[in-house]
Image (tube, coloured by chain):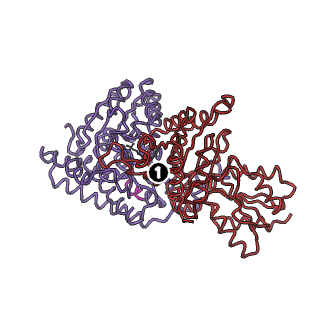
Chain colours: A red, B purple
């Protein structure tokens, strides 16, 4: 099987679904690029190149470059989804949700329930998350916790190319609005990816590594940091089970609870800020349903409750890393009542 | 032209400072000395300086991701700016903001902005303060052709008209929003006309010509200070670099930038105008060039020598630290 990057995997998923279903359209700023310029179309293909070349195959009716106007993009996507298209809209940086949240939060997310089950809103919003590029406070956030808190939205956070392709195809075929979060530092990450179309179901966590001592739940880039920490800890005799939920809504609560039932210890690793977050959500889930088996307090390794700083040294302190994860796991393992 | 010698020299100095600052930032960015993203303002200097030469420290501006020029024109410290871009201690924002968030409230600079269309609503806020306190200050938003299409911009313009706020909307039309042409993205291809549709006086001026921008801004500022409400100015301009440093610029035709630099350089244009009219001597301008070159060298040297921000600053300036 061929090794492919997350960028290639996402591109392949889009192209294959667009071939399969003429109702799938791509909408966003510079998803092709070059409109109204001397240099011609496809000058960009998305700011990170995921949609490069799609306009050549599918034309400008299906690869739709828009003005800079996120409210109208998300509204147009929601409105077209509820009336018969299956749009994949791009919100370039997830931080820009601030500009267009109404169309997601009050409109797309609510249609199915609020209209008594009559509406289907097969909408995918692809968006970039994550710190680590000195992109500062307005281009580095990871607001999937905000999206996850909204009933009616599904939220996907792939951590590798195989999952990225299968989850994006699943997202496009799903009849609910899906927020698809892509970490900006992971596009070049390679794994084996089948050439043909396939789906990865929502609500099924991936057990990245088995272990009996401590359960670690991590998302996106933190999966890789947690895996590195688990390697280190294994050499010290601490056996970690690492769970990548892959989707936060729906969340595979059973896999997490089953694991904690065996380990009795939970560490949640999340690049997002700690308040009202996925880390808080999973900690609450386990505290509520697995209190009796816990051998140590639930621990969270997250960013601090601050905006993302610009200076590289500060940003490095901001983002959880393998050392911090390992240190917290050791504390959990060594905890004595 | 009603500018005296001192004002002309200041305008020239500010424009050259921006140009040299940006050229140097490009170099330092290529060398890997500047983290993150930078969006360079070179080519558009007449806009920032033509506009800000009518403003004092108590007037406010809000800028964009392409904010270095506006900051310099509004009086921000060039050394402090360079330190900020390098992410060093002593930077204008303590190294926490960087290029895209460079700000200095002491100089009425409400910040560059990472959000396209983030500025205009803030500017009507600063204009509301001025109107409420009756201090005859004004507030100016700089917005690109791309940002002119953002709903927030439309809402701010309408509100400014409704409340007759001392706000001025400057639209810098450099022909591109990222990699897409304004020809495509601005439906009416007439940003000034669209602003006029909201019910405010709006003009389009040639951004190669400092004096054209300056004249339009004089009128708009006088009107705003006198309680006459908002205005809009569309400045036709051009950018000499890519959208950001490192942009391959596939959307541009070959030689486009070379031509722009030859035919639409507001600095060369200014020099020609003031020397032809014998308002300033070439020697005066050369002296400014030398001063500015030294200032930029000094700023870069200071930035290279400065330490990174203290680790504790990660947790300061925010009211909850859990
Ligand atoms: C809300 C939002 N959408 C998109 C972007 C990404 N982006 C940054 S600059 C830019 C283009 C802005 O074009 P324009 O307003 O013409 O300003 P210019 O870059 O030409 O100065 C875009 C799309 C952003 N930063 N914020
Ligand atoms: Mg522009």
Residue at 57% in and 57% down: B313
Asked if one can make out residue B221 in the rendered structure from this viewpoint, the answer is no
**Residue designated by label 1:** A51
| Above-or-below relation of B44 to B86 | above
Q: Quadrant of residue A243?
A: bottom right
Magenta span: B74-82
* A289 sits to left or right of B110: right
Could you say where residue A280 lies in the image, as x and y percent from the top left? 72, 50
- In this view, the residue in front, A49 or A325, is A49
> Neighbour class for label 1 at 10 Å: few (<14), some, many (≥20)?
many
Asked whether, in this view, residue A257 is left or right of residue B181, the answer is right
Mark yes or no: residue B196 visible: yes
Task: In the displayed orientation, state which residue is furthest to the bottom.
Answer: A235
Q: Is residue B67 magenta?
A: no
Q: Is mark 1 within 8 Å of ligand 1?
A: no
Q: Quadrant of ligand 2?
A: top left
> Residue B7: x, y in percent?
24, 44
- Left or right of A51, for residue B242: left
Q: Mark 1 falls within which chain?
A: A
Say whether residue B211 is left or right of residue B134: left
Residue drawn at point x = 83 percent, y = 62 percent: A262
Using the image as rendered, state which of residue A268 and residue A75 is in the foreground: A75
């Amino acid at each position: 099987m061929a090794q492919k990057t997350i960028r290639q995997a996402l591109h392949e998923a889009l192209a294959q679904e667009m071939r399969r279903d003429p109702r799938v359209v791509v909408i966003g700023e510079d998803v092709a690029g070059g409109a109204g310029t001397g240099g011609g179309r496809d000058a960009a293909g998305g700011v990170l190149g995921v949609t490069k070349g799609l306009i050549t195959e599918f034309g400008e009716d299906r690869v739709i470059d828009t003005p800079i106007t996120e409210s109208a993009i998300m509204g147009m996507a929601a409105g077209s989804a509820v009336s018969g298209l299956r749009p994949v809209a791009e919100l370039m940086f997830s931080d820009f949700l601030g500009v267009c949240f109404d169309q997601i939060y009050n409109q797309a997310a609510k249609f199915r329930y609020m209209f008594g089950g009559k509406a289907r809103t097969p909408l995918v919003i692809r968006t970039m998350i994550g710190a680590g590029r000195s992109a500062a406070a307005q281009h580095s956030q990871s607001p999937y916790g905000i999206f996850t808190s909204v009933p009616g939205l599904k939220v996907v956070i792939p951590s590798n190319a195989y999952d990225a392709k299968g989850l994006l195809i699943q997202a496009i075929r799903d009849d609910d609005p899906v927020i698809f979060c892509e970490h900006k530092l992971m596009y070049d990450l390679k794994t084996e990816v089948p050439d043909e179309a396939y789906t990865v179901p929502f609500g099924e966590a991936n057990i990245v590594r088995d272990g009996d001592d401590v359960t670690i739940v991590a998302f996106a880039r933190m999966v890789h940091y947690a895996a590195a920490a688990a390697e280190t800890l294994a050499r010290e005799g601490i056996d970690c089970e690492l769970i990548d939920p892959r989707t936060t809504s729906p969340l595979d609560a059973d896999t997490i609870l089953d694991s904690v039932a065996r380990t009795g210890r939970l560490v949640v690793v999340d690049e997002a800020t700690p308040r009202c977050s996925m880390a808080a959500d999973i900690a609450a889930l386990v505290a509520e349903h697995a209190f009796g088996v816990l051998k140590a307090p639930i621990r969270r390794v997250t960013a601090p409750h601050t905006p993302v700083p610009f200076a590289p040294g500060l940003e490095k302190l901001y983002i959880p890393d393998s050392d911090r994860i390992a240190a917290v796991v050791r504390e959990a393992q060594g905890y004595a009542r | 032209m009603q500018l005296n010698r001192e004002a002309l020299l200041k305008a020239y100095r500010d424009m050259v400072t921006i140009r040299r600052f940006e050229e140097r930032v490009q170099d330092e960015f290529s060398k890997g000395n500047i983290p993150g993203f930078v969006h360079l303002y070179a080519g558009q200097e007449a806009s920032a300086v033509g506009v800000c030469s009518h403003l004092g420290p108590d007037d406010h501006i809000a800028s964009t991701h392409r904010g270095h020029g506006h900051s310099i024109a509004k009086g921000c410290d060039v050394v402090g700016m360079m330190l900020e871009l390098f992410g060093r201690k002593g930077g204008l924002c303590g190294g926490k903001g960087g290029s895209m968030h460079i700000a200095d409230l002491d100089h009425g600079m409400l910040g560059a902005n990472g959000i396209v269309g983030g500025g205009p609503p803030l500017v009507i806020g600063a204009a509301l303060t001025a109107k409420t306190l009756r201090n005859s200050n004004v507030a100016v938003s700089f917005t690109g052709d791309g940002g002119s299409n953002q709903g927030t911009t439309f809402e701010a313009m309408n509100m400014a008209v409704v409340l007759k706020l001392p706000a001025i909307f400057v639209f810098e039309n450099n022909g591109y929003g990222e990699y897409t042409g304004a020809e495509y993205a601005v439906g009416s291809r007439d940003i000034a006309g669209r602003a006029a549709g909201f019910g405010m006086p709006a003009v389009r001026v040639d951004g190669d010509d400092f004096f054209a921008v300056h004249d339009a801004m004089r009128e708009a500022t006088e009107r705003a200070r006198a309680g006459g409400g908002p205005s809009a100015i569309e400045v036709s301009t051009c950018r000499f670099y890519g959208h950001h440093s490192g942009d391959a610029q596939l959307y541009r035709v070959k030689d486009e930038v070379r031509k722009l630099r030859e035919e639409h350089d507001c600095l060369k244009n200014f020099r020609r105008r003031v020397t032809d009219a014998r308002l300033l001597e070439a020697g005066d301008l050369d002296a400014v060039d030398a001063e500015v070159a030294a200032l930029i060298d000094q700023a870069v040297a200071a930035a290279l020598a400065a330490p990174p921000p203290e680790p504790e600053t990660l947790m300061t300036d925010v009211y909850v630290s859990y």
